[in-house]
């Protein structure tokens, strides 16, 4: 049987190399929003801008606090949140 502890070395944020244990420890320390965890750990600040890890962190916060994920505040996003070619921006600026 796989225990909850067996998953603690699982990498949650591949961009910043942050484990589930690190996220759980931060939540235990009192960091209860995605933005707080992002600022203290850089989780969500990598090249994918949290597209991979944000939902996992929200799930851990929800599980720990007993809230539904829909009740949690979303983290802030920086544009562009999706890769776009620089030529498209240049054309838009010219047009
Ligand atoms: S996986 Fe966390 S920022 Fe990319």
Image (cartoon, rainbow, N blue to C red):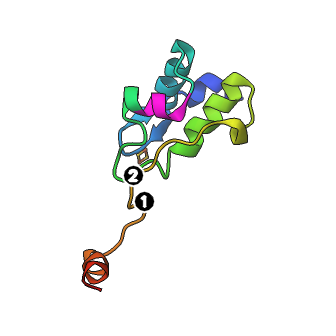
* Residue at 69%, 39% in the rendered image: 69
Q: CA distance from mark 2 to mark 1?
A: 6 Å
* Neighbour tally class for label 2: few under 14, some 14-19, many 20 plus, Cα within 10 Å: few
- Bounds of the magenta span? 33-38
Tell whether label 1 touches label 2 (CB within 8 Å). yes
Give the structural element (helix, strand or loop) at label 1.
loop
Q: Is mark 2 within 8 Å of ligand 1?
A: no
* The disc label shown at residue 78, or none: 2
**Dominant secondary-structure state across the stretch colored magenta:** helix
* Residue at 69%, 23% in the rendered image: 65
Q: Is residue 51 above or below residue 21?
A: below
Across and down, in percent, residue 31 comes to 52, 21
Q: Nearer the viewer, residue 65 or 89?
A: 89
* The disc label shown at residue 81, or none: 1
* Neighbour tally class for label 1: few under 14, some 14-19, many 20 plus, Cα within 10 Å: few
Q: Quarter of the image containing the C terminus?
A: bottom left
Across and down, in percent, residue 28 comes to 56, 15
Q: Nearer the viewer, residue 21 or 83?
A: 83
Answer with the quarter of the image where residue 27 lies. top right
Give the structural element (helix, strand or loop) at label 2.
loop
Query: Extreme top residue here?
Result: 29
């Amino acid at each position: 049987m796989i225990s909850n502890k067996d998953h603690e070395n699982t990498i949650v944020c591949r961009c910043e190399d942050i484990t589930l244990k690190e996220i759980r420890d931060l939540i235990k320390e009192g960091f209860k929003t995605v933005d707080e965890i992002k600022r203290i750990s850089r989780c969500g600040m990598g090249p994918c801008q949290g597209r991979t890890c944000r939902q996992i962190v929200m799930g851990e916060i929800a599980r720990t606090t007993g809230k539904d994920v829909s009740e949690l505040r979303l983290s802030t996003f920086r544009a562009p949140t999706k890769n776009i070619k620089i030529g498209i921006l240049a054309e838009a600026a010219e047009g």
